[in-house]
Every structure is written in C-alpha cells, then in structure tokens.
Amino acid sequence: MCGIFACISKDNKTAVKVINGLKKLEYRGYDSWGISYKNANGINVVKEVGKISAFDPEEANFADSNVAIAHTRWATHGGVEVRNAHPHLNKENTIAVVHNGIIENYIELKNELIKKGYEFKSDTDTEVIVQMIDSYMDFGFEKAIEKTVARFEGRFAIVVIDKNADEIIACRRGSPLILGVGKEETFIASDIPAFLSHTNVVNYIDDDEMVKITSSERHFYSLRTGDEIQKRDIQIEWNIEDAEKGDFTHFMLKEIFDQKETVQRAVDQSDEEIMAVAEKIKKSKGVFFVGCGTAGKVAKAGEYFFAHVAKRHVNFAPASEFPLFHNFLLPETLVFAISQSGETADVLEALEVAQKAGSTVFSLTNVVGSSIARKSDISLFIKAGPEKAVASTKAATSQLALLLLIAYAVAGKLEEGKKLLLEISSNVNDLLNPRFVAHTESVAKKIAHKDNLFIIGKGVNYPMAEESAIKIQEVSQIHAEGFAGGELKHGPIAMIEEGTPCLVLVGDDESKQEIVSNAIELKSRGAMIIGIASEKHDCFDEFIRVPESGVASCITNLIPIQLLSFYLGVERGLDPDMPRNLAKSVTVK
Ligand code: F6R
C-alpha cells in the first residue's frame, strides 16, 4: 500500500536507479507515481498518473543527481490526480517528502498551518507533513522532522530530502521501511525487492526510529529518547530471480507455479520450534487466530484443523474485528496472527490490543523482519519467497500447510503431519501440469462472461469457498460469493437461475456426501455445477479432478481456484497482477 524508494549514492544516476527500483514496488500501489531528485539547481520533480511500469526512465533525460526519492501511490486521501501524487514539496521547493500510511489528525494540523498562512495544493495528508517540516525549519532540518512527527497520530513511513542537506532522513511508525546497504550507496525502501539488484544487506528500521543516511553512513536514532541506536547488518536470503516474473507473463501465474516447491518449504521447519509452539498452545487459556482477507480465511480454516486434528477449540476473528473481543484476553491467552506481508495495519492493531492485555502473541508471516514478526513473542516463517501479485496464492497454501502441521504437533502427531504434507506437496507439484492448467483455462473460458458466481464448501472447505470468492472478485471482477453449502437453502439459493455457475469444493472427509447433496440442490434450481473434487459425480457439469488429500483437501482445492481466477481475469481483459482499487500490503486501517 504505497511504495517508497530512495537512494543516496556516489554516482550521479540515482534518478534512473530509483525509478527502476520503484517499478519493483508497483504491486504496492499503481494509481500514480512521482520522483524528486536533487542537483545543483535544486529539487526537480516528475509526477504522473498511472502505472510506473509504463515509464521509461532512460528516455526521460533526467539531470545528473546523487539523491532521489520516489513513490508509487495507492490513493487514500485525495483522488487519483497529479496534484495528489507524491512527492509533496513546500512552497519554495526546498523540501520534498514521500509517505506511506495515514496521518489521522491531519485536518487539525492542516487548519493550524492554514492559520499560519500555508497554502495547500493537494487533498492529501502528506502535504501537511512537508508544510509542517517547513514551519519548523528554524530548528534545523533534522529537528524539524522530529518535531513534525511528534505531532502525528496514525501510522507513517516518511522519507524527506532538503535542498541544502547532503543526506536523506526517514522515520517510521507502523508502516514498513527497510534500509539497504550498498557499495558507496544507501537505499531506503518499503520492501526489499526495490534494491535487491544492488544489495541483499539490510538494516530493519523499527517503529519510532529515525535514520539519517549518506552514501556511506547511516545513523539510527530513537524518536522517543533521541539516543543513537546500533543496528546489525542482516543478509537476506531472497535472490533477484525470486522477485522477478522470469518466463511467466504475470507474477500471479508464476506464484501459482511456485507452489510446486513452496508447500514443502513451508513445512520444512525445525521440530523443536514447532513443538515449542505446540506446547505453548496446549498450555494457553484460549487461542485466537487472526488475519485479514485471504490470510483471514486461512486462519478460519485453522479452526477446523484444530477441531479435527488437535481436538482443541480455537477462535477465529478477522483482525479488524478482534479488538472488540478484548474482554476475553488474559495473560494466558495466545493470539496467533497470520499475515503474508507482516505489515497489515488491522493485524498490527489486533496484536497491540493483545499485548496490552498481557497476552502472548505468535505470528506466521512470509517476511523476515516485518513489523508483525518483530512484534511477536514467537514468529514462524512460511519461506514462500516474495509474493508480488496482489492476489495471494502461494502464501495462502503455505500458511495452510504450516498451520495444519502445527495442529498435528498439538495432537502429538508431528511425524504423521509431516508425512501427509509431503504427500500434499507432491500432489500440488503433479497438479500443476500443462493438461490440468489447460483444462482449468477451458472451464474459465466457459464462464468468463457470467455476472454472478457462487462457491460452496463444507468443513475446512467452507473458508476456502470464501477465499475462492475473494480470489475471483479481485482478479476477474465477477460478482462471486462463497458459502457453507448448508447455508444456501437459508437465503442465497434465491440468486440461482438457469446457468448460474456454482463451484463446489468437495472435501475428502465426512463432509463429502453433504456437499454433493448441496450441489444437487443447486442443480435442481438450474445451476451449472463445476465440481472440484477427487471423484467425479453425476451432478457435475464440469469436473476438475484433484488428488485425494484428506484433511488437506483445502490446499489442493485452492490450486484450480487460483488458476480459474487468473484465467477469468485474462479472459475479461484485466491485469491479474494489479486488481482494481487494491494494493498489496494494506498498511492503513
Ligand atoms: C487477497 C489478498 C488479501 C490479503 C490481505 C492480508 O488475495 O491478498 O486479502 O490476504 O490483505 O494481507 P497479509 O496477508 O499481508 O496480512
């Protein structure tokens, strides 16, 4: 949700470098983009509405510069217009700011600045930041930033340059910022892929920290105490290929195919670590699984895994609703957050609520060093590699696999769980063959013109029906809804008419007969039934066969759903990697 990339270097081609790096963050927002770069003439600005990927920096004739900051925007405050694109500058064009997050009290601060005579050109909360820094500049550049952020309520990551200072200053609270240590150059970005072609050595910037960088130096300070902080250089394991599309047309398709390996990687964890998590779960008084969107559906599937495999009651709450359950939190309660990015604002807030009550916090994320991982008492990683398509695919199946393994560990059956998940990984690998993909594409072609689509599942496939709806909605913009099969006859069946496509996720467990009966009920109302199952049934008009997978059928059933969503999007002329109105990593509430 908004991408920031900045560089200060000994070489003077930073503008091109920063644009190329920003392109790697396009998944974080693609409404508009902008860059400010500095040279002897002052601060230059280029801003455009639309996607950064369409812009060729080599043709732009950028003047030489060794300092540049850039931003790709997912609009929150102010429409998609050039005047609302970042960077924002003060009146004299001597200070430029890029920002990710929301300054919740910006209206109050804006009114205060207007009274002082400041004029605003945009509708953004970000312009308040630059004008406020300007208003404090008598204290010096660094102090002006400190004084400004001390006034903010909300979450922010900001990067600032001053025409008269040979440094970049950045601060964060709640939104991600990572520093990349290059050779005679230093980078600051919302996410690692922006600078991965230059360096894999990083420093994590924590909440309420400020960093001042030059091409060869970096100094970290606490915004609370003003004390300097020492940081460890961390070498990260991702390589450039992991963050590129390779021969695939889209990141989404590449990431679907990555699942040939990622399910296995997710469960390749140390036994000691998994058992430590399992023991803590067993000793806790109350477990909550929380997450948003797709990760939330995985968390909901976790309820079923624990009911069936571990025979333990756990609660699921969407992270945005979780704070309303604060009365049930005890020091012995365990809150388990699931998040691909590790930066989702609603999840972070849920964890803050849990920690305030003294509860223990565990997390399962994909990004080492992410805010959620760093906030957690124990953090596990799914090791799926960068997920860049906005629609989550490989992260979801990896989260499901690891959560299921934990349920087996709680049941005292870790080895059984490992064996099952090894089989599932090999099933996923087999599924992703050209024939299967072509068959799924052909089914997508048959229904791509439909306006409405329903998905049903039972047991652990019920949250997967809801996940399927999320995937189809975001990638294809078809109106899709997912239900527990038994719920249809209580209302939604009224929506079924002749030819309405209904996807039926059949599990390989005790739910099988009932969900097939639900499919028959739909068929008798005229629905076109697309069965995703390990066995064919007469009521299916279209059949997508998946291998028998027991309690892990939710993992194998998701593979055709992801492919269907992708091909539905393509058929409807959409870009599956960049769904309308969305962005990866939702760092605002
Ligand atoms: C949908 C999707 C979103 C995310 C949600 C949470 O395909 O990707 O629903 O799952 O925004 O994001 P994370 O997992 O990063 O917390």
Image: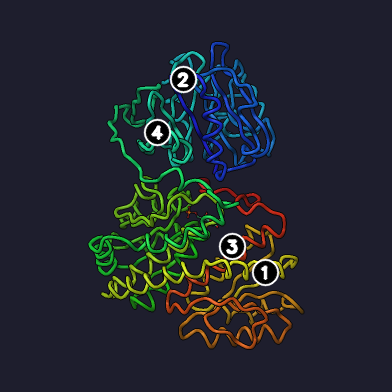
Q: Can you identify the residue that label 1 sits on?
A: 442
Give the label, 1 or 4, closer to the camera.
1
Q: Residue at x 28, y 63 (%)?
A: 274
Q: Can you identify the residue that label 4 sits on?
A: 180
Which of these two is toward me, 246 or 40?
246
Q: Can you identify the residue that label 2 sits on?
A: 11
User: Which image quarter: residue 170?
Assistant: top left
Q: Can you identify the residue that label 3 sits on?
A: 470
Task: Identify which amino acid the numbered label 2 is placed on.
Answer: Asp
Sequence-first tag of 1 and 2 = 2
Sequence-first tag of 1 and 3 = 1
Give the label, 1 or 3, closer to the camera.
1
Task: Identify which amino acid the numbered label 1 is placed on.
Answer: Ser
Q: CA distance from mark 2 to mark 3?
A: 45 Å
Label 3 near ligand 1 (CB < 8 Å): yes
Asked if one can make out residue 82 in the rendered structure from this viewpoint, the answer is yes
Numbered label attached to residue 402? none
